[in-house]
């Protein structure tokens, strides 16, 4: 498959979920073979942070990339949007430490990408040279994420919460092999799903210096009596958002190997551990 980049630049400004800092992001076309990468334009020498597994520096409630002392966090929604909309190469300029949360989903990013469109490039996509002929597992307690041998790329996720409004949810999504249909499917089925939080955990997270930018405008919040800010965009919006996170984290591989990625009660940390295992096998 040919590589693709954006036909024009995209600009968004917003507040970061954990830092509460307002940042401006410009996503620019990039040359073939360059991949997706961040540039901290607010810092001297404009340090570049590649969107690669090797750059992951933290996975506490979001995925953070770093190079030396420079970092950019909560990258998963934006990266999921780029890979979900078939953008192989992109220069992401940001003037602060965290990607804006916007409405808590990837909907704004995907709409922006659809609006500007893509440009085909002469280079072909670099497929990971890995034939997954046996399951690859990462687990912690009863939480796990794995890559299973399959004939098509698929993402399936399960979550289980004591809160009745969430409960046990499963969802499965497979991107089409056709570029246009794949982007439309991602934009309609996965990208609109918003991040969610549990009411009884909010005070602790705030005391821990997290979710400083969180609000009922950019995150779903669920308590024992139900959702504080309905309506939901999907009956199972929470688990669809977990697929969004998984797609964003595994995008750090560059391209997806053909596999069924299956997760249950997993986390960014487990997602990244699986990605690292896949890379280790590819390089062995």
Image (cartoon, rainbow, N blue to C red):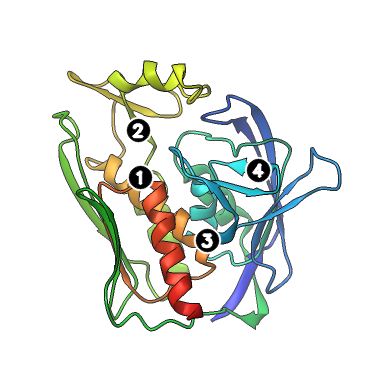
- Inter-mark Cα distance, 2 to 3: 23 Å
Q: Earlier in the sequence, mark 2 or mark 1?
A: 2
Q: Position of residue 111 (x, y in %)?
A: 53, 49
Give whichever of discs 1 and 4 has the lower sequence position. 4
Residue at numbered disc 1: 241
Q: Which residue is mark 4?
A: 71
Question: Residue placed farthest to the right in the image?
Answer: 45
Q: Which residue is mark 3?
A: 252
Q: Residue 261, located in which quarter of the rendered image? A: bottom left
Secondary structure of the residue carrying numbered label 4: strand
Sequence-first tag of 2 and 4: 4
Q: Secondary structure at mark 3?
A: helix
Say whether marks 2 and 3 touch (CB < 8 Å). no
Q: Are marks 3 and 4 in contact (CB under 8 Å)?
A: no
First in sequence: mark 2 or mark 3? 2
Does label 3 or label 1 sit earlier along the sequence?
1
**Residue drawn at (45%, 60%) of the image:** 250
- The x and y percentages for residue 20 are 58, 24
Q: Is residue 67 left or right of residue 138?
A: right
Task: Please tell me which residue is depicted at 45% across the width and 38% down the height of the picture.
Answer: 60
Residue 128 in sight in this render: no
- Residues under labels 2 and 1: Cα distance? 8 Å
For the point 53% across and 34% down, the residue is 102
Residue located beneath label 2 in the image: 196
Foreground disc of the pair 2, 4: 4
Asked if the residues shown at circle 2 and circle 1 are in contact, with their CB atoms under 8 angstroms apart, the answer is yes
- Front one among 28 and 157: 157
Q: Alpha-carbon distance for marks 3 and 4?
A: 15 Å
């Amino acid at each position: 498959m040919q590589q693709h980049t954006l036909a024009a630049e995209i600009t968004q400004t917003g507040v970061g979920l954990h830092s509460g800092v307002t940042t401006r992001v410009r996503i620019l076309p990039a040359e073939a073979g360059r991949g997706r990468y961040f540039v901290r334009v607010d810092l001297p020498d404009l340090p570049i942070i590649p969107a690669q597994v090797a750059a992951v520096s933290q996975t506490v409630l979001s995925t953070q990339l770093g190079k030396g002392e420079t970092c950019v966090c909560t990258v998963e929604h934006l990266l999921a949007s780029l890979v979900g909309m078939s953008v192989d190469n992109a220069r992401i300029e940001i003037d602060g430490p965290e990607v804006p949360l916007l409405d808590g989903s990837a909907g704004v990013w995907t709409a922006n990408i659809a609006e500007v469109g893509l440009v085909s490039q002469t280079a072909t996509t670099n497929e990971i040279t890995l034939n997954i002929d046996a399951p690859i597992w990462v687990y912690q307690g009863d939480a796990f994420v794995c890559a299973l041998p399959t004939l098509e790329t698929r993402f399936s996720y399960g979550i289980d919460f004591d809160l009745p409004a969430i409960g046990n949810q499963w969802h499965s999504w497979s991107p089409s092999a056709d570029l246009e249909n794949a982007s439309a499917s991602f934009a309609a089925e996965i990208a609109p799903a918003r991040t969610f939080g549990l009411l009884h955990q909010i005070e602790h997270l705030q005391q821990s210096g997290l979710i400083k930018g969180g609000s009922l405008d950019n995150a779903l919040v669920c308590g024992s009596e139900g959702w504080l800010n309905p309506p939901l965009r999907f009956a199972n919006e929470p688990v669809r958002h977990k697929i969004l996170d998984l797609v964003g984290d595994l995008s750090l591989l560059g391209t997806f190997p053909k596999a069924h990625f299956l997760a249950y009660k997993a986390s960014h940390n487990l997602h990244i551990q699986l990605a690292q295992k896949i890379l280790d096998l590819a390089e062995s």
